[in-house]
Amino acid sequence: MNRESAQSELKTTLSPMGFTLRIWGGRRFGWLEAGFLAVVIIALVMRLWELGGRTAHYDEAIHLHFSWKLAESGGAFLGWPWIFGTDYFHSPWMHGPFQIEFTALIFRIFGDTDVTARLGYVLFGTGLVAVPFFFRHYLGRTGALMAAVMLTFSPTMLYFSRFGRNDIIMAFFASTLLILMWRYINEGHRRYLYLASGILALMFATKETAYLIVAIFGLILFLVSIGDLVPWALGRTKLSQVSHSAGFFLLLVSLSLPQWSALSGIFQNVLGLTLTNPDPQTGANIANVDGTVGLVGAPAWEGKTLLLPVHNLPIEVHALVVVAGLSILTWLVYHGGLTSRRIACIGGAPVAITFAITLLLYTPISNVVETRDVPALDLSLAVLMGTAAICSLIYYRYPFQRGTLLLFIPILLTTLYAVLFTPLLDLDAVVNGILPSQVTIGPASNGLPLNYVVALGILSGTIILSAVLGIRWLGSTWLICAGIFYFLWSVLYTTFFTNMAGVFSGSWQGMGYWVAQQDVARGNQPW
């Protein structure tokens, strides 16, 4: 290739048309693509036509009110999160936070009118029409186009695409998840797992029907994959060897399992606990210590308590524990032969990560951000030691699953030891920072009710079980999936990390609130 032709090819590649062709992947723009484009345009016009001409429905008014408040409120530090304010706290009776935050973003960009109030739902309803295009290889080209036409002219789809409620958003996410599941089973590309992880996070942040969708898809996949799962359960095969259908089943289970934790509230009467506080309408709600209504769907702050620390051990005992831990690590290093790899990975990595987590635990969070104080040095050292631990495992190419355990076990044991045997935890500060404001504990006694101890144990157990299943199945790929899921989930539930109580309300009340609602039976529902 001469210089002139090379320069010509470079210009073509960098041109807008060349870039578009590379993104399009060389696919021909034929009758199918033209048909889909026409149908999508028709769907968009139908959904936009006289969009603001109808009075807001009761449900719409609720969602739009809180979206407007969020859009009009001010930001936190330096205006964060910039795209809207911070005046929104997730509450499960309004379902997930996604539609509130998405509509607030539209209000911030285009202003608040009856049209912009429903614009986000129009976009998702129009996007749903385009979804069959990505299923064309399995539905057939004609079948995919006909599906798009039916979605366009369906009266039900048209109505909910112009209605300010999250039903159409869930329809879009559920259809997308179905296609990703089908394509992963048949093609096996891991990018479908990454996309599915993001869709799952958005589903759980949109509406609690996500539980039903995951249950339906999971049951189908379980029946299809039972031939792979039974041999694994009997110890005849490894989890990493299961089929793609079993793999997608494991993705659904491992990412969603912690979300189901509050389902344990169904058995709270048998256990003698209150894991999901009943609705006041049932007459069984357990009030807070100050007499206010207890938080519905959350564990009740009453009953037996676990005083923290359980026992404040003297410094000599702490020293003995440290010596015992170092002795165990020394024995493990020598047990398989003394090499630089074993010293760095089995000995150095756990010590470094323990040092890092100890610095973080015993440094007040309020002081960490003070760049002119000593705690800033603590934070820097913690990050440095944690990075060193991870880098040593990567440098020596230590087996991924074992390396994960070498980091996770010290973190877990150090945290438990610090909470149970040292005066680390200021319960009042934790309650004010993590639990919703409706939970009040009265005079601080640093006692954690048994209801919360059990709930925390169930939630922690499901997280650990999820991680074990996911890592044994797909190793680092699963960690990427989990990272995508929990990042999006936490961003949305905490309103971009401005309301940390969203972590609790999303992980426990998302299911717990609706467990508590089963005894309310509004309008004689469900029968």
Image (cartoon, rainbow, N blue to C red):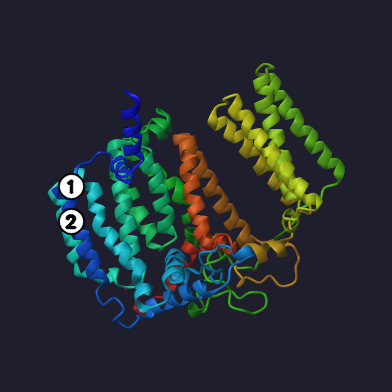
Which of pointers 1 and 2 lies earlier in the amino acid sequence? 1
Identify which residue, 286 or 62, lies in the foreground.
62
Q: Where on the picture, by quarter, is residue 321?
A: top right
Quarter of the picture holding the N terminus: top left
Quarter of the picture holding the C terminus: bottom left
- Percent position (x, y) of residue 76? 61, 66
Q: Secondary structure at mark 1?
A: helix
Residues marked 1 and 2 touching at CB (< 8 Å): yes
Q: Which amino acid, mark 1?
A: Leu
Q: Where on the picture, by quarter, is residue 225?
A: top left
User: Which residue is pictured at 48% across the width and 34% down the height?
Assistant: 475
In this view, 117 is above or below 507:
below
The residues tagged by marks 1 and 2 sit, at their Cα atoms, a distance apart of: 9 Å
The residue beneath circle 2 is: 147
- Percent position (x, y) of residue 320? 82, 37
Horizontal relation, residue 380 to residue 408: left or right: right
Horizontal relation, residue 333 to residue 194: left or right: right
User: Which residue is pictured at 50% across the width and 62% down the height?
Assistant: 265
Q: Which mark is residue 139?
A: 1
Q: Which amino acid, mark 2?
A: Ala
Horizontal relation, residue 76 to residue 40: left or right: right
- Percent position (x, y) of residue 361? 72, 49
Horizontal relation, residue 185 to residue 514: left or right: left
- Percent position (x, y) of residue 123? 32, 64
